[in-house]
Image (tube, rainbow, N blue to C red):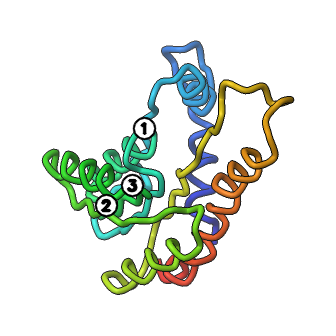
Amino acid sequence: GECPHCAELQTLHGRRDEEDGGADEAVLLRRKLVQGELVALPTSSMNQSNRIALVTGANRGIGLEIVRQLGERGISVWLASRDSAAGEDAVDALRKEGGDIRFLQMDVAEIGSIRSAFKTFSSQVTRLDILINNAGILLDESTSILEVGPDVVHRTITINTLGAFFVTQTFLSLLMKG
């Protein structure tokens, strides 16, 4: 059988938007993203109300919008954030809009925090259908890439690359059940 996500992407790439002179819908979405516009998530494969999602780095920005849109589709969403106060505030605001949104404290730069988050999460649910590794940082953006120090580079790579790797590795057993 064909992967449903691959089929969704093939369908998305094959669609044409008549209003934009036949441009690929995927190209239009990328163009909107580059221009700083938030893009709606495709609805065809994300409308099952019994699905469970986890979004890291979700207390603001793109992560928060992803949580909002998944929640609007009836998906039970866990909003993960390293900052408990900001994460809980975001969950409270989203719950007022409706939806099953829960908070999970997780700092993707700390393996102990990831493991603790897994323990909390797995004590309440038995599977995970959607994992979105959104957590990421841009340290010292005022410094040129040619002048940035090794500590900043190391921390950025740890969070942006290894964080996503270790979150996926830790939650994989639940993803396999989803």
Quarter of the rendering containing residue 119: bottom left
Q: Residues within 10 Å of mark 3 (few under 14, many from 20)?
A: some
Mark 2 belongs to which amino acid?
Answer: Ile
- Secondary structure of the residue carrying tag 2 is loop
Q: From the viewer's perspective, is the residue at label 2 or at label 3 nearer?
A: 3
Q: Residue at x 62, y 21 (%)?
A: 23
Instruction: Please say if 87 is above or below 15.
Output: below
Q: Residue at x 51, y 18 (%)?
A: 18
What residue would you read off at disc 2? 75
Mark 1 belongs to which amino acid?
Answer: Gly
Q: Position of residue 177 (x, y in %)?
A: 49, 83
Inter-mark Cα distance, 1 to 3: 14 Å
- Secondary structure of the residue carrying tag 3 is loop
Task: First in sequence, mark 1 or 3: give its number.
Answer: 1
Residue 155 is tagged as: none
Q: Position of residue 9 (x, y in %)?
A: 60, 48
Inter-mark Cα distance, 2 to 3: 23 Å
Residue 83 is tagged as: 3
Could you tell whether 139 is left or right of 131 in the image? right
- Secondary structure of the residue carrying tag 1 is helix
Quarter of the rendering containing residue 4: bottom right
Q: Position of residue 41 (x, y in %)?
A: 44, 43
Task: First in sequence, mark 2 or 3: give its number.
Answer: 2
Closest to the observer, 100 or 26: 100
Residue 61 is tagged as: 1
Q: From the viewer's perspective, is the residue at label 1 or at label 3 nearer?
A: 3
Q: Residue at x 30, y 63 (%)?
A: 103
Extreme residue in the left direction: 96
Asked whether the residues under the numbered discs 2 and 3 touch, taking CB atoms below 8 Å apart as contact, a structural biologist would say: no
Could you tell whether 84 is left or right of 98 in the image? right
